[in-house]
Image (tube, rainbow, N blue to C red):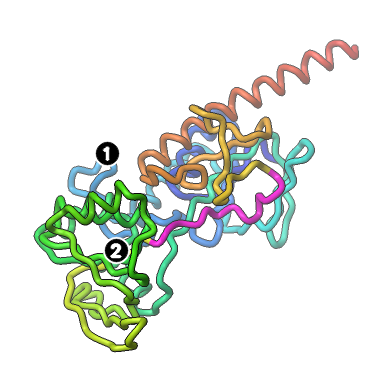
Amino acid sequence: MSHYKVIIIGSGPAGLTAAIYTARANLSPLVLEGLQPGGQLTTTTDVENFPGFPEGIMGPDLMDKMREQAKRFGANCQFEVVVKVDFKQRPFKVSTEDKTYTADAVIISTGASSKWIGLESEAALVGHGVSSCATCDGFFFRGKEIAIVGGGDSAMEEATFLTRFASKVTVIHRRDDLRASKIMQDRAFNNPKISFIWDTAVIDVLGSKETGVTGLKLQNLKTKAVSDFPTEGLFVAIGHKPNTDIFQGEVELDATGYVVVKPGTVSTNIAGVYACGDVQDHHYRQAITAAGTGCMAAIDAEKYIEALESEEKTTQKASV
């Protein structure tokens, strides 16, 4: 089968919620899961803020449950990576490395990837003391001393948020001044729980999956001096990159690469193409908000397809 009424690109909370809703509407969606089936939640150990799980749930387990729920209603989930799309004419074309599919409607839910420092030790400890989401993981660091890397608004916002839980937050920044807006800087500077280490880079993360993060190896970029810094957690807040490279020239993107949707909707500038989750949301970036927009995209896609089918029937009757 190469033609589907709905193709969903991406399989995080947004994409799988869209799959559940479109499948329940008897649209038999095709879900192209991408390189990381389940999205960013598959790198998260404990998820304690998703409604319905009072004891918390492992991120990969939550995504497995969502996938099984979608498949139960008839979604076709395939481990394929989309390499090209063509939204310039209908039916829309979606190409993977081996196949080209067509669809009446497409839901984009490819998410956004956290920017990381790029250390092997950092990657090994994601979910074990290393995080890129204060809202998601701050609770786990109650009463601990932690560090955060970054110097922009998001870093200052997360540092301030983390002081609700941590006993001390140390901001490590490569320069001697912040890129953050004045108001965000003032909030951080005036918070007694926040301190700063300037002109410094993290060159190694110390610890193990068993112990969690125990410290950082730092290098002063001016003096080149290397030192060990004890800490119980590391938050990386150097930005996110939306996964939208394949949509360049096909849908409207903003200056930072996020898909632009009409205010209050998940509709792109192309009728029949919708965007949900972190690929169009650089503000909230939560599993529950992503799932909500996945529901919106599914309902809008269903209505769009109904209108298409009604129009086709009217045309057929007129031709007879």
Q: Residue at x 19, y 43 (%)?
A: 54
Residue 165 lies in what quarter of the image?
bottom left
Per the image, the residue denoted by label 1 is 51
Q: Nearer the viewer, residue 3 or 275?
A: 275
For disc 1, the neighbor class at 10 Å (few under 14, some 14 to 19, many from 20) is few
Reply above or below: 67 against 58.
Answer: above
For disc 2, the neighbor class at 10 Å (few under 14, some 14 to 19, many from 20) is many
Label whose residue precedes the other's in the sequence (2 or 1): 1
34 left or right, relative to 283: right
Asked whether the viewer can see residue 94, the reply is yes
Magenta-drawn stretch contains 14: no
Per the image, the residue denoted by label 2 is 235
Q: Amino acid at mark 1?
A: Pro
Asked whether the viewer can see residue 1, the reply is no
Q: Could you say where residue 181 lies in the image, as x and y percent from the top left?
A: 36, 50
Q: Could you say where residue 166 lies in the image, as x and y percent from the top left?
A: 14, 58
Q: CA distance from mark 2 to mark 1?
A: 24 Å
Q: Point out the stretch of residues depicted in magenta.
A: 238-250
Residue 119 lies in what quarter of the image?
bottom left
Q: Residue at x 29, y 43 (%)?
A: 50
Q: Could you say where residue 297 lies in the image, as x and y percent from the top left?
A: 53, 33
Q: Could you say where residue 290 lies in the image, as x and y percent from the top left?
A: 42, 41
Label 2 sits on a secondary structure element that is: strand
Please say if the residues under marks 2 and 1 sit with CB atoms less than 8 Å apart. no
Label 1 sits on a secondary structure element that is: loop
